Image (cartoon, grey):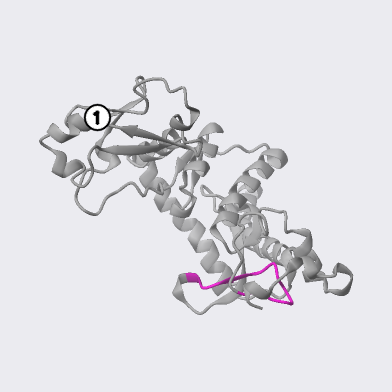
Amino acid sequence: MPKDEWNASAIDPTEVPRAVREYLDTLDEAAFGAASTEQPKFTSHSDPASQWTAARKGPAFFSYSDNYLIDTDHGVIIDVEATRSIRQAEVGSTKTMLRRVKERFDLHPERLIADTAYGSGPMLDWLVKRNIAPHLPVIDKAGRSDGTWSRADFEWDAENDQYICPEGHALKQFRRNYSDPNRGPTGKGTARYRALKEVCQACPSKTKCCPNAGARKITREETEDARQVARDIAKTHQYDISMKLRKKVEMLFAHLKRILGLGRLRLRGPCGANDEFLLAATAQNLRKLAKIFPAAQQTRNA
């Protein structure tokens, strides 16, 4: 059914299959309904919690996403979470799984390795505040394609709460105290830093900085400190090692489809998807443990 015809509030829970009741029960959960207010293009009557998606520009289909938390040192799956196939839900599942392994096994990772989809400011900030080093690429849209200076070319002066341009001029957020609160912070998680117009007009590098504006402006997110932590980590040798370890994660998903044949789910609904993903992860872990423990057993017998 197209999204403009779908109305979840009109469904009678007593007259629908189990998968539809599970859909109604998970509308407020981040993994399935609450991660995004955007409605999918189409909704399935038999399994409405599944997501209509066209992954990798292929043909669209209804699907769930399988999210793993993996110990990359040994290739063992620590936790599993089923979600709708949308980025917000998949990224949110990381927080769920990290909290769960802390409660169950008292495990607290030193670092988290993931792809660019997980490199948003709020996610990086969440990790840094919990002393988990973010070994993942940063989502950064501050770059410019016209050859002018980007935000990365400006030096951040945290002590004085200002940016310094390559010519040595300061970009400040406030140059005096405003009595009107509307002229203060934006309240949207970002701050604006501006240079003086008379300074920019006389600057010899204006064509490289702000050729179409009277003065240069820069926005800074409230999570920019965490983003900078991730950028600094990306310059280290340990980060290069982490990117190689990421292949272990991708191999497990390839194994899931090609060897275990889980290219299609047999059960419907959020619970059905989660059960199948858990069983598949268990099978993968058993294969891994079977390769480890026999050798150790032979050593003890000898």
Of all residues, the one furthest to the front in this rendering is: 180
Of all residues, the one furthest to the right in this rendering is: 14
Q: Going by the image, does 15 lie left or right of 295?
A: right
Please tell me which residue is depicted at 60% across the width and 68% down the height of the picture: 40
Residue 287, can we see it?
A: no
Tell me residue 68's x, y (percent).
Answer: 59, 55
Q: Going by the image, does 260 lie left or right of 9?
A: left
User: 288 above or below 113?
Assistant: below
User: 214 above or below 175?
Assistant: below
User: 263 above or below 136?
Assistant: below
Q: Going by the image, does 135 lie left or right of 67?
A: left
Secondary structure, mark 1, is loop
Verify whether residue 77 appears in magenta: no
Tell me residue 295's x, y (percent).
Answer: 59, 54
User: 163 above or below 134?
Assistant: above
Q: Nearer the viewer, residue 284 or 70?
A: 70
Please tell me which residue is depicted at 59% across the width and 61% down the height of the picture: 38
Tell me residue 141's x, y (percent).
Answer: 36, 49
Please tell me which residue is depicted at 28% across the width and 40% down the height of the picture: 152
Please tell me which residue is depicted at 19% across the width and 30% down the height of the picture: 198
Tell me residue 266's x, y (percent).
Answer: 71, 76
Q: Nearer the viewer, residue 92 or 294?
A: 92
Q: Quadrant of residue 247?
A: bottom left
Disc 1: which residue: 196
Of all residues, the one furthest to the left in this rendering is: 204
The chief SS type of the magenta part is loop
Q: Quadrant of the N terminus?
A: bottom right
Look at the image and give the residue range highlighted in magenta.
Answer: 42-55
Amino acid residing under circle 1: Leu
Q: Nearer the viewer, residue 104 or 120?
A: 120
| Total residue callouts | 1
